[in-house]
Image: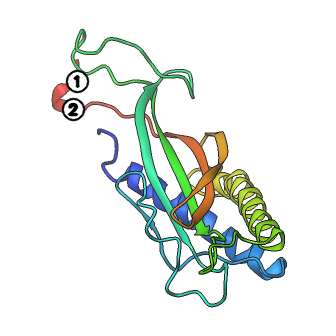
Amino acid sequence: MALNPLAVHEMAETVLGCVCAALEETAAAVEDQPGCPCRACVVPGPPAWDGCNDPCAEGAGAGGQLTVHVARTFATSSFPVDDRTVQGVKNCQPPAAIAVELVVTLLRCAPVMDSGGCPPSFEELAAAARTVHVDAATIYTALLCCLPTTGTRRRGPVFYLGAQRVLEQEGGCMGVEQRVTVALSAPCCPSEESP
């Protein structure tokens, strides 16, 4: 049997669920911290920055947009390193595993100039920084603690937490981007293609 055609999407949905649940828990524990945006989904590529103002949220600085997308999928024999084995030499020679690199992006509304052209106050900037820093820690912890509890085996999937970065403010949005690479089941050839 080949790699489950839904494996990549299901893993993206799992990551989204882990992060969204953690954001809700953090909002309940940390005063004035927004929870998981109602605008949260798996998207087909890097998200458009047109959804940081969550229509479901109440209050300044609340809401946002949470997305997960696939950055790349690759073969690996020594996770998380790309496998450079030349294919096509021996019929169907599957790699040891397939890995998927997912990108979690959380956008929130950023403080902007007021109608009089004055920049945001230091208090507004400090509150925005706090929100971003709490979001960053929550996303990192969510992946570190939730992913091992998912899956059908006794333990969850093998994964590697990549770089996390705070995104430069743009168009009234600010946020965090976290990369995570997850090993999926090893694919194998359909029986009629076996060597």
At a point 25% along the width and 21% down the height, the residue shown is: 92
Q: Nearer the viewer, residue 21 or 118?
A: 118
Q: Can you give x and y, in whole percent of width and height, for residue 59 in the image?
A: 66, 89
**Residue furthest bottom in the image:** 58
- Residue occupied by mark 2: 191
**Mark 2 crowd level (few <14, some 14–19, many ≥20, 10 Å Cα):** few
Label 1, secondary structure: give it. loop
Taking the spot 65% from the left edge, 72% from the top edge, the residue there is: 21
Q: Looking at the picture, how far across and down is residue 114, in whole percent?
A: 63, 78
Residues at discs 2 and 1 in contact (Cβ within 8 Å): yes
Quadrant housing the C terminus: top left
Amino acid type indicated by mark 2 = Ser
Considering depth in this image, is 122 or 34 the residue closer to the camera? 122
Measured Cα–Cα span from mark 2 to mark 1: 5 Å
Residue picked out by circle 1? 194
- Within 10 angstroms of label 1, few (less than 14), some, or many (20 or more) residues? few
Q: Is residue 185 left or right of residue 29?
A: left
Q: x, y (%) of residue 7?
A: 40, 50
Q: Residue furthest left?
A: 192
Amino acid marked by disc 1: Ser
168 over 27 or under it: above or below: above
Residue 15 position by quadrant = bottom right
Q: Residue at x 34, y 41 (%)?
A: 3
